[in-house]
Every structure is written in C-alpha cells, then in structure tokens.
Amino acid sequence: MKKIVSTFALFLVLSFIVVLIPEIGILQAEPRTIVIPDDYASIQEAINNANKGDIIMVKAGTYYENVIVNKPLTIKSQNGPENTIVCTVNTETGKNVFEIAADDVEISGFTIENSFNRTIPGDPFDPASYVDGCGIYVETCKGTKINRNIVKNNFEGVVFADCSNILVSENQIPESIHEGVRIAYSSSVTISNNTITSNRNCGMVVFRCSTGSVSENQIVANGDGAVVSNSQGITVSNNNITNNAFHGLNLVGGQDHRIFGNTMRNNTNGIWLSGSTNNNIYQNTIQANYYGIALSGFSNNFIYHNSFINNSLQTHFSIGNPYSSWDNGYPSGGNYWSDYNGTDNDGDGIGDTPYVIDGNNRDNYPLIAPSSFTPALKYRLTVDSMPYGVTFTVDNVTVTAPWSEIYNENTSVTLTMPESRSFEGQNYRWYLWSDRNTNRTRTVTMNTNIALTAIFAPENTSLRISILSPENKTYATTDVPLEITVNRIFYRTTYSLDGEANKTIIGNTTLTGLSNGPHNIIIFIEDNPGNISSSGVIYFTVATASPTISILSPEKKTYDANNISLTFTLNETISWIAYSLDGQENMTISANTAITDLSDGSHSLIVYAKDAAGNTWSSETVYFNIKTRKTEPQQPEPPQSQQSSLSVSSSPMEYGHALVALAVASPIAVAGYLSLKHKKLEEAK
C-alpha cells in the first residue's frame, strides 16, 4: 500500500513539473556586449564567437569586410556612421557588405559602402537578381531593423527578399548604381524617416508586398522616386518626393493603397498609375511636374483633396480612358486645380462648375483654394557623443545619445550637455560640438537636417598617437591602409604624405594610388581648437613590380672591334645601375656607355638595376664574340715545271748562280734558302 501511495505522489510531482515548465521557460544567459576591436579584430570574428542576443559594439575605424550575420544580434557603432565605415573587401567581386540570414538582427550606426555587381539583372523586379552588390542584403528573415546608417555607393543600397516585420528607419541612402531600397515578396514593411537621394535607377521599390508604410522620407533626385509594384495595402504618407528624373510616385498594378500628405514637386510625373486600382489618393501637393497625375489602363481610384499646382499638364491618360472618382462629394469637395477658371458665387469654397478632365473624368466639386491640409516641411535632428552614450537634455527632457527626432520647419530645439561625465572608468570633461560651437547649452532652429556630435575630452591624460599602418617596410601595392589609434578623444585628424599639404580624414582610411618608391607620413591630431599634436615620421616604400631591363647592344653576334657600345632601356626610375662583364665585379654606370679594350674571344654581359625600394634586378645574360686578328694567306708553291728566279733546278750550277745572287741581296735569305735546298736534296735521295 505504501509503495502505491509513494508511486502516486511521485506521479503528481512529475505532473506538476511538466505543467509548470512552459510557464517557467528556459533560462538564458544575459546578453553580453562585445567590443571591436578590443575583444576581436573583426566584426565577422565577433559574430562567429557571439551568442544569440549579444550586442556587438564597433569602435571608430574602417573595416574591410563582407559580413554574414547568421544569428540574432545587435550590431552597432560606438561613434556613429561618419566615424565607423564598413567597406567590401574587393569592389570587383560584388559581394554584399552585410548579408543577414537570421531573425531579429539590428544593424545601426555604420557607413556601408562600395559593393558593386557588374551585371545588371535581366528582370528588374526579380529579387533573386540582387543577391550580390548590396550594401545590406536580407533574405527570409523577420524582425530586421536597419537604422541610422549611411548606405552609399553600392550597386543596390538595402535589399529585402521574402521577409516580414521590417524596419528601415533614419538612414541616409545615396548614390546607388541601381536602387536605394528594394523590398520584395515581404509583409509588414516600415520605411520611415530616411533620406534617399541620387540613386541612379530608383530611390525605392516595394514589389509584391502586403501591408506596410512608407512615411516621412526625403526621396529626392533619383531616377524614379518611389515605385510600389504589384503590392497590396501600402500606405505612402508625408514624404517629400521631389526633383526625380522620371516618376515621383509610380503605382504599378496592385491595389488598396492609401496615398496622402505627400509633396510631389519637380518630377517628370508627379504620380503615375499603371493598372493600379482602388487606391485612395488625397491631401497631396502635386506641383510643378510635367504631368501632375498620369493614368494608364484601368484605374478606378479615388482622387480628392489634392492640390494640382502649375503642372505643365495637370492630368494625362496614356492608354485607354480609365475612370476614377475625382471628388468626395458635396460639401467635402474635390481637388484644387490651379488652372480652374470657374467661379464661387455662393462662397462655399467649391467651384460652381465642374473641372472637366476628359469625357469620362471630371471633378464635380473643384476647390477654389488649395486644400487646407498642407504638410509641414520636416527635418531631422540627430545628436551623438564621443565617447558614446552621454545623457543630456532636449528641451529639458532627459535623453541618451545617440538620439534623433523629427521636427517641423523652423522649430527651435534647446540642447544641454553635462559639464562632465564618466565612461569606462575614465572621467571626461565638456569639450565642444562637432561644428566647433563650445557652448554646452545651445538652441538650434530646424530649417534643414542637423547632425551634431558632443565631444568630451578625458581629464589628466596626455595625447598619444600610434600609427598601426603603414609600417616601416616595403608594400607590394599602391593602396596602403592608414590606421591610427589615439588614447583619448580628439577633434580633428589630418595627415601629410611626402611633405604635401595636410588632408583631413574621419576614422581610418586607405592611401590610394601611391607611386612606386619611398614615402613618408605624419599624423596630426587637434584635440582642442588650435592645439595640434603630431606623430613621428613613418617611412615606407611602395614597390609593385620589378623594373624591366632590355639590352639593345651588344647583341648575340661576333664583333670585329675591341670597343663596343652598351645600350639598354628601363621601364621605371632606378636608383643605381651597373654591368658585369664575364662574371667580373660590377661596374657602376649612370647611363648608356661604351665597353673598351675587349679581348678577342667569347664574352658575357649582365646589367643590374636597383629600384627606388632598394630591390636589385638583372637583365638576361647576353653572349657575344670579339674577333679582330687577321691571318696572312699562304703562297702556293709553283709547279716544278715552271721556272722563276726562286725556282729549284736540278742543275748544281744553277743552284750556285742563285745562291750568289741571293747572297748579294741578303745573307739571311741565302742561309735560309741553302737550308731549304739541302732538305729537298735529302728528300730527293
């Protein structure tokens, strides 16, 4: 019986634990903060060693990486995008700078640049065409946040494919070769408060997406401004869409969009609708475009309370004669048309006669004055700090940097920084703002986007500058990284290369296009206005290729003179040149010369050169011959049948007469002749 009771009690306990486990959940380690480059040298190395939910904090510098994020992480800069730059490793490969392949990833506070895809895709709306060449590429993820970055000079800026719960906010996205932002096959999309400018093909594309908003963006000076294609339920509101080369807002296919509160000014077409239906388009200012609004194909849209002001053509129909509703009935009214010539005799603010667009379309209740809704111009104020994370006040409200907010035009905002603060165990005192204003409390007026950094200087710390690169060595490339560290906060960095005028830099950079030869560099740090410290001089050398030495003379042949010319060519400047003849000691020369007193016979020659880097190179060995001695030709003996004054006769008397004659002429010749004749007589016996 006791055994049964014990067993039953154990069953109850286990059952209780099983029921309780879902409520308790699984305990997880607290997220940790990993600092780059203190803890790991690269962002990728930190990701590889991070746990789910960790924070990766990246200090100022330039990082050449193609980063793959494969776990939920927050990756942000410590010193803001102007000071923290992530570039692709090789611009020619087209690899993405950041590639995200996990849910719940946040990328914040970087400049992300220089990824190119050299092949323009065949289908401009196929997201699979854009897996390379992106500043940021995200596929099949949810909960991604991209905010407060500068994403510039890429083939594509920011690309999402098959994602949900997306936030793209407070970024600057300029100068993409193709598009600034592309969202495809995604849902729950938020694109807000971005500045999207000077993108060659299009500022932004939303393709085959459902539910989302595009709001409070500056979409300026792109090819197309914003394209919403084959999507459903997208809200486009309160955007400034101006100075785009083609369409301001292009609605292609799709349905059920809400378009309100936008300014479309100085585009070719303010709004272009092509086969897009059941959209509500209201309270927009459409001004100074060529076509105010253009419709192509069936539309059936609701267009009211907009202000059409001084467009070359207020409306345009390119295919068919689509019908749309152009007013909201009486007394709500229709649209304001700057070229409406009707009257308002009853003073109700609505024209007494319709504004006729074409045979199928008319605004029955045109407004006499622009709609009372006029979207205020808005500007962004961003405040950061060095070191990171200062607590300060905005209009007496306490906030922490980095901080950002949108304000209406001409709003005054008061900022107050503390006199001192502590960061990572070091005490800092107020120094100045990044625009060199030294007042801790200041008021700014919002008539443009403003970005400020509050700079604090460490107390009782002398400035130390360390140059990590270049080093005192020879580099086999013309692009050499410039990397420095400074032990405390400073205001400005400049450098002088080879004694030239100082150049200002932000963060680490690369010295590009260096010539072959010796170089030197000095770093200057300004830690207070006018107070400049300098590093020591770093000497380094660039040597990318060996000089080519071509010997034109001597050639591989035989010469009949003892003096020959040494003629050669070089393809670059050299610091020393010499030649070695027949393996002997080098003879230093300064230019083409002559080699004299050569002996007859075979010779070899090598020319040596030393480049500006101190490397010694040699030509190929040239082999040649000298032959100057002439060989005397031998006189043939005349036939014995012939007679001459020196011919040999068989008569002893004739020998005697000849000997007498020769003796008179030359005793030496006679002696020689007698010896020769004696030999011949002996041979005759």
Image (spheres, rainbow, N blue to C red):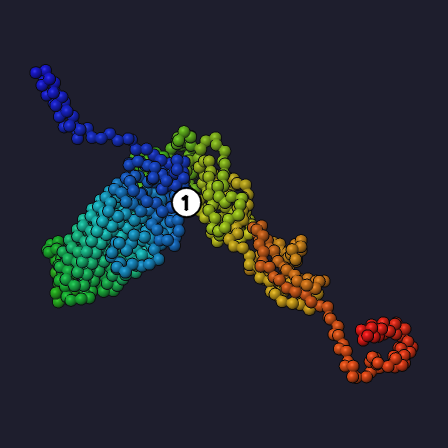
Front in this rendered view, residue 246 or 556: 556
Q: How many marks?
A: 1
The residue positioned 33% from the left and 39% from the top of the image is 47
The residue positioned 21% from the left and 46% from the top of the image is 164
Q: Residues within 10 Å of mark 1 (few under 14, many from 20)?
A: many
Residue closest to the far top: 2
Question: Which quadrant of the view contains residue 286?
Answer: bottom left
Q: Position of residue 508 (x, y in %)?
A: 44, 44
Location of residue 116 with respect to 36 vertically, above or below: below
Judge from the rendering whether residue 366 lies leftward or rightward of residue 177; answer left or right: left
Front in this rendered view, residue 624 or 169: 624
The residue positioned 14% from the left and 66% from the top of the image is 321
Judging by the rendered image, the residue that carries numbered circle 1 is 62
Q: Amino acid at mark 1?
A: Thr
Front in this rendered view, residue 36 or 507: 36
Q: Position of residue 338 (x, y in %)?
A: 21, 61
Q: Quadrant of the C terminus?
A: bottom right
Residue closest to the far front: 685
Judge from the rendering whether residue 152 lies leftward or rightward of residue 123; answer left or right: right
Question: Which quadrant of the view contains residue 666?
Answer: bottom right
The residue positioned 24% from the left and 57% from the top of the image is 125
Residue closest to the far left: 1
Q: Position of residue 413 (x, y in %)?
A: 32, 41
Front in this rendered view, residue 23 or 676: 676
Residue 218 in view of the camera: no
Q: Position of residue 143 (x, y in %)?
A: 24, 42
Question: Which quadrant of the view contains residue 341?
Answer: bottom left
